[in-house]
Image (cartoon, rainbow, N blue to C red):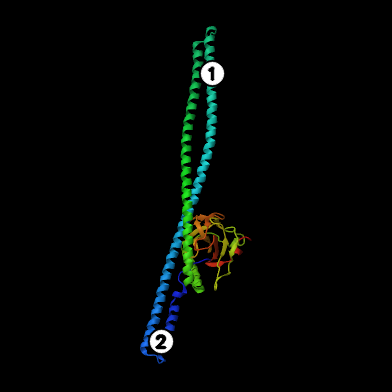
Amino acid sequence: MNLIPHKPTLFKKSNVSAICAGVLLCLSSAIFTSTPASANTEELKGVKGEITRQQKNLSHQQKELDKLQKQLKSDELAIANTSKSLAQTRTSLKRSKANLKAYDEQHRELMAKTQSQAEALQKLVKSYYMMQTNAKIESFLSHESTQEKDRISQYYQHLAKQRAAIISELQQSNIQLEKKNQQLVAEQQQIESLLDQQTQQLTKRRSSQANRKTTVAKIKKGIAGDSAYLNELKRNESRLKAEIAKAAKRNSVPMDGLAKHKGKLPWPVKGRILHYYGTKQSGQMNWKGLVINAKYEQPVKAVYPGTVVFADYLRGYGLVLLLDHGKGDMTLYGYNQVLTKKEGDKVTAGETIALAGDTGGQSRPSVYFELRRNSRTQNPRSWLTRH
C-alpha cells in the first residue's frame, strides 16, 4: 500500500526523551571535568537551543505534511466527484443519441405514411371527380332517385374530409417531431460541451494531484523512516477496524453469510495480483487483503449480495466501500475512484459498486480487497474462485 506517513516516530516522546538523555549525559560529563561552570552552562544552553530548533523544524514539517495530506484528500474527492459527473454525462449523451436515432426512424415512418396518405387522397379526389362527372351524364339516362344520388355524394364528401383531416394531423405531428429533433440536437450539443469541460477539469485535477503527491513524497523522505511508515500503517489499520466496528454496530443484516460459498465467490475485479494476503508490507506488518491491478475506472463488483454499511474516504485506503453479508461476514473494497453505492443500499452479487482508482495516495490504479469474519481477516483467495 502506498501510504503517506502522518505522525512519524520522530515526534514520539520516546525520541525526545532520547535527546534529553543525551543532554543529561553531556551535563554529567561536564560535572566531572575541570571545565568552568560558566562553560557548562553555555554548553547546556546550546544543546537545549538545538533541541528546540529541531523540534520546531519537525513540527513545521509535520504541519506541512498534514496540510498536504488534507489537500490530497480534497483533490481525490474532487476527482471522484468529477468522474462521477462525467459518467452521468456520458450516460445522458448516450441516451440523447438513442433518442435521436429513434426520432430518425419515426420521422422516416411518418414521411412514408404521409406520402401514402397523400397519394390515397389524390386518387380519391380523382375518383370522386370522375364519378361526379359520370353522374351528371347518367342523370339524364338513369331513373335513380335524387335521394340516392345525394347519399352517394355525401358519402364521398365524408371520405374526402376524413382523408384531409388525417393529412392535417400528420402534418402537425411532423412539425412536433421536427421541434423535438431541434431540442434533442441542442441537448446533445450541450452535453458534449459539458463532457469536454469536465474532461479538461479532470485532467487539471489529476495534474494537481500528481504535483501534491510529489511534494508529499519529498517531505516524507525528509522526516519519515521505516518505523514511521510502519506506525502509519498501524494507525490506518486501527482506523479501519474502528470504522468496521462502528458500521457493524450501526447495522444488523439478517443474511446467511459466506460460509456456504467458500471457494465459489467471483472476483471483485479482473486483474493481476500485486500484493498477496499475508505477505510483508513493512517491517512486521503484513497485508491483510489482496491488492489487485486494475484499469482506471474499471467496474468493481460485489462478490456476494449484501448491504453497504460504510461508503466514505478513509486515510490510507482512499474511497472505501464495506459490505455486510450477515453472520459477521464482511468484504471491503478500497482505492476506488468513484463509489456508485451509498450506505444503506442493497446490492446483488456481480453488481457494480465502485470504479477502480488510485485514491489513498496510491501510485497506480488498483483495488484493495479484504474479507473479514467476525472482524478477523481471512485469505480472500481461499474464498474466491480459482484465479
| Residue 66 appears anywhere in the view | yes
What kind of element bears circle 1? helix
Q: Which mark is residue 27?
A: 2
Name which residue type carries label 2. Leu
Depth check: 126 or 226 in front? 226
- Closer to the camera in the image, 192 or 271: 192
In what element is the residue under mark 2? helix
Amino acid type at circle 1 is Lys
- Taking the spot 41% from the left edge, 75% from the top edge, the residue there is 55
Q: Which residue is mark 1?
A: 126
Residue 311 in view of the camera: no
Q: Is residue 300 above or below residue 52?
A: above
As displayed, is residue 12 above or below residue 66?
below
Q: Residue 87: x and y, percent? A: 50, 51
Q: Tell me the crowding category of disc 1: few under 14, some 14 to 19, or many 20 or more residues within 10 angstroms, Cα based.
A: few
Image location (x, y in percent) of residue 294? 57, 58
